[in-house]
């Protein structure tokens, strides 16, 4: 919680600044992002004669760079911070400065990042979750010394035992925990399978086209590219070889990208925390308190299901909207489904995965179809009315929506087993939620007119996180919905042993 504005009691001697190399780090990221955006626009709009390297592009780039240099220097100059035993003080701004005070007791967590750039400069970065419901829910100290980071973590740990600390570490700094058990280490085969689920082919083609578009403005490479294309188009055999080579190179690109990101992925735990290590170029380490895990989400996309792999995510009370603080949400980025079912209870003994789910009634298909009438009837009708030549798009949309609702009615399922409620939704893309009775904040039951006539109901379950996570379960039997409601109410009197 942010403290009310007050007179700054922090002396100038106690205020600290980011390392001056932050200016270069910030400018590099800003200019790199701007150039990539311009390249994307040039490719999207086919501006073959007006690229970022043209005179107009250079003028725009020069003006942008000048503005970023001035604003970045001012931002660094005005950014000051201080931490004592009571509060965290932040002063920041470019042209207008703002001072903020945060109580140490309300800080939810810390994440330490050491990217390749940080490791080369001997610095590190801290993201401090301030426990705010606002969009800017984390304070980032992006360029500080390792010793300063350690001092901050020690101060916060002394004030709040439950502050979860997450770190990205160097090769020569490895955390040591007593009584830890190794549960999972990724192997090359799993990384290869995971790389097949990415859109590496599309990204690889986009990358090649971007490079060609820019180089062709200044070098006569069109002749050589045309010769290569003519060579592979000379026969059907060569065309097949060319396409195969392109696919092979894109797969290599996808594998290397996945390997750099998830190579060395390892999960260990002790009695209180889960520890995760991953990455090669940017080596990452973070920990998650087990008592902060509120629920689990097991997700599988279409390609994931074909390869029988899944992603396991944690829903915890330390979740935030900040992207950097969400790193600990993913427990297994890609893993075989059977293996995940075995490892989840091992890593989190307080959770269990039920394989036997009760399917929702088949009559729920009718409710699902009526609920999505705007998608399979109204939207296709509007497409056909305004764009009659695109009638096939309207038909395809209607078929896709109708078939998805039919499959949802067939494959959706639920179970209430002791202190756990588990629900599976989706068909092509499936999501399974595992929720503990004691972690559910609110459970609401609702019935539409059609549901009431068919003996069905919907449940809205609220899980404590930041922001609050709401999970909606549609079209379960009304008797089961009331049973779940009673099960939730009874949690104050002790864990229920209801099983359905």
Image: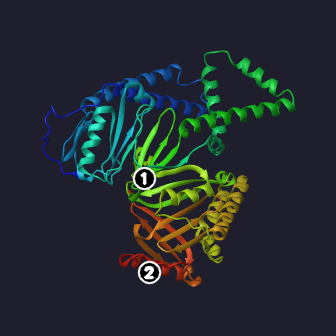
Mark 1, residue position:
270
Category of crowding for the residue at label 2, using alpha-carbon neighbours closer than 10 angstroms: few (below 14), some (14–19), many (at least 20)? some
Category of crowding for the residue at label 1, using alpha-carbon neighbours closer than 10 angstroms: few (below 14), some (14–19), many (at least 20)? some
Disc 1 to disc 2, how far (Cα)?
35 Å
Please say which color scheme the image uses.
rainbow
> Of tags 1 and 2, which is closer to the observer?
1
The quarter of the image holding the C terminus is bottom right
| Residue 440 visible to the viewer | no
Residue in view at x 12 percent, y 44 percent: 7
Residue 309, image x and y in percent?
63, 52
Q: Nearer the viewer, residue 484 or 189?
A: 189
Residue in view at x 42 percent, y 66 percent: 462
Mark 2, residue position:
486
Callout 1 secondary element: loop
Residue 257, image x and y in percent?
58, 35
- For residue 449, the mark is none
Q: Nearer the viewer, residue 316 or 132?
A: 316
Looking at the image, the residue that sits furthest to the front is 179
Residue 9, image x and y in percent?
12, 41
| Count of marks placed on residues | 2
**Of the residues under marks 1 and 2, which one precedes in the sequence?**
1
From this view, report whether residue 447 is shown above or below residue 52: below
Q: In this rendering, would 397 be left or right of 351?
A: right
- Examine the image and state in which quarter residue 248 appears: top right
Residue 108, image x and y in percent?
32, 52
From this view, report whether residue 428 is shown above or below residue 153: below
Q: In this rendering, would 181 be left or right of 426?
A: left
Callout 2 secondary element: helix
Q: Nearer the viewer, residue 252 or 176?
A: 176
Q: In this rendering, would 431 be left or right of 324?
A: right
């Amino acid at each position: 919680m942010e403290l009310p504005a007050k007179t700054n009691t922090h002396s100038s001697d106690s205020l600290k600044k980011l390392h001056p190399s932050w200016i270069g780090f910030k400018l590099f990221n800003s200019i790199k992002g701007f150039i990539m955006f311009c390249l994307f626009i040039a490719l999207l709009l086919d501006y073959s004669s007006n690229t970022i390297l043209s005179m107009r592009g250079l003028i725009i780039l020069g003006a942008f760079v000048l503005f970023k240099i001035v604003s970045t220097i001012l931002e660094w100059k005005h950014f000051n911070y201080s931490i004592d035993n009571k509060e965290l003080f932040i002063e920041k701004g470019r042209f207008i400065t703002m001072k903020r005070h945060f109580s140490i007791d309300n800080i939810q967590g810390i994440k330490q990042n050491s990217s390749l750039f940080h490791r080369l400069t001997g610095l590190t970065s801290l993201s401090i979750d301030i426990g705010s419901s606002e969009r800017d829910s984390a304070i980032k100290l992006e360029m500080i010394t390792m010793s300063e980071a350690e001092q901050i973590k020690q101060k916060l740990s002394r004030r709040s035992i439950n502050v979860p600390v997450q770190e990205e570490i160097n090769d020569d700094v490895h955390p040591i925990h007593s009584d830890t058990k190794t549960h999972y280490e990724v192997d090359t085969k799993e990384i290869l399978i995971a790389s097949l689920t990415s859109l590496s082919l599309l990204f690889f083609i986009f990358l090649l086209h971007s490079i060609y578009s820019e180089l062709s403005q200044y070098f006569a490479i069109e002749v050589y590219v045309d010769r290569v294309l003519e060579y592979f188009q000379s026969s059907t055999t060569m065309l097949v070889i060319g396409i195969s080579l392109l696919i092979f190179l894109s797969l290599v690109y996808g594998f290397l990208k996945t390997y750099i990101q998830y190579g060395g992925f390892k999960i260990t735990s002790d009695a209180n925390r889960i520890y995760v290590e991953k990455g090669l170029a940017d080596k990452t380490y973070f920990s998650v308190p087990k008592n902060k895990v509120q629920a689990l989400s097991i997700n599988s996309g279409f390609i994931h299901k074909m390869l029988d792999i899944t992603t396991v995510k944690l829903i915890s009370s330390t979740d935030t909207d900040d992207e950097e603080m969400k790193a600990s949400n993913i427990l297994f980025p890609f893993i075989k489904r059977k293996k995940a079912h075995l490892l989840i209870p091992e890593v989190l003994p307080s959770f269990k995965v039920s394989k036997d789910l009760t399917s929702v009634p088949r009559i729920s298909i009718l409710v699902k179809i009526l609920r999505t009438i705007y998608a399979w009837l109204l939207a296709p009708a509007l497409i056909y009315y305004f764009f009659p030549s695109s009638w096939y798009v309207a038909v395809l949309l209607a078929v896709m929506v109708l078939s998805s609702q039919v499959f949802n009615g067939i494959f959706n399922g639920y179970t209430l087993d002791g202190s756990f409620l588990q629900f599976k939704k989706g068909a092509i893309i499936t999501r399974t939620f595992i929720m503990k009775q004691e972690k559910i904040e609110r459970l609401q039951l609702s019935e539409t007119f059609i549901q009431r006539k068919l003996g069905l109901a919907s449940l809205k379950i609220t899980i404590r996180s930041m922001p609050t996570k709401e999970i909606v379960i549609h079209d379960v039997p009304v008797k089961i919905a009331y049973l779940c409601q009673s099960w939730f109410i009874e949690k104050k009197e002790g864990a229920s042993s209801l099983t359905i």
